[in-house]
Image (tube, helix red, strand yellow):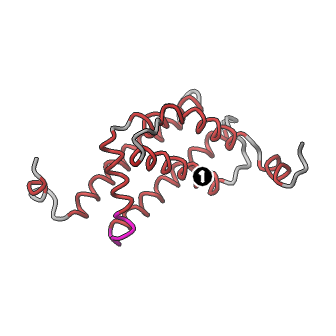
Amino acid sequence: MSPGNLYRYFPSKEAIIAGICERDRRDAARDFAALDTAPDFFKGLEGLARHYLVERPAEEVALWTEIMAESRRNPEISALMKEGDADITARMTDMLKHAGARGEIATDLDYPGVVAAMMALADGLTWRRAVDPDFNAETALPSVLRMVHSLLTTPLSAQSRSNNGDEK
């Protein structure tokens, strides 16, 4: 389809991006719901990470980095991104709380901090895939998963002792 033909279906660039964002929010909601009921939280999380961070086509990754960049210049796109981030943050927080209630992760996590760190890791890997042709997300994924596992299974009390130098 030609770029001009897209405007027969969408009135503006912002409407096209809104459609992409809505489709991706719907997909993410479905994927988080599936992870929330997975028999093994960490295996499910690995599958979700692999899908979004490794297996997504390069064109889709590039498109998301363009949308992220456009959100810095365009208030409408910025609002869409903020709305999407708020939705993902809420879904991730709920998912982590449920995993904690099932005993799969620590129960005293700083949920806003943990979710922000996980989102920053995902955004960073997405950006790296888009800008570095030599970057191999498959090779990086095990290290990322180990970091996330440690983040999710280390109680806050142990983290604060370690940060204060009390734990050896």
Numbered marks: total: 1
Give the residue at mark 1: 117
Residue at image coords 23%, 57%: 16
User: In the image, what residue occupies the spot 37% across and 61% down?
Assistant: 69
The x and y percentages for residue 17 are 28, 58
Tell whether position 11 is magenta: no
Taking the image as shown, residue 102 lies to the left or right of residue 158, namely: left
Task: Name the amino acid, label 1.
Answer: Ala
Residue 39: name its quadrant: top right
Horizontal side of residue 116 vs 12, given as left or right: right
Q: Is residue 52 toward the left or the right of residue 95 in the image?
A: left
Task: Find the magenta span and give its range.
Answer: 70-76
Q: Nearer the viewer, residue 16 or 168?
A: 168
Decide if residue 110 is on the left or right side of residue 40.
right
Q: Secondary structure at mark 1?
A: helix
x and y percent of residue 147 in the render? 65, 40
Q: Position of residue 164 (x, y in %)?
A: 86, 55
Q: Is residue 21 above or below residue 36?
A: below
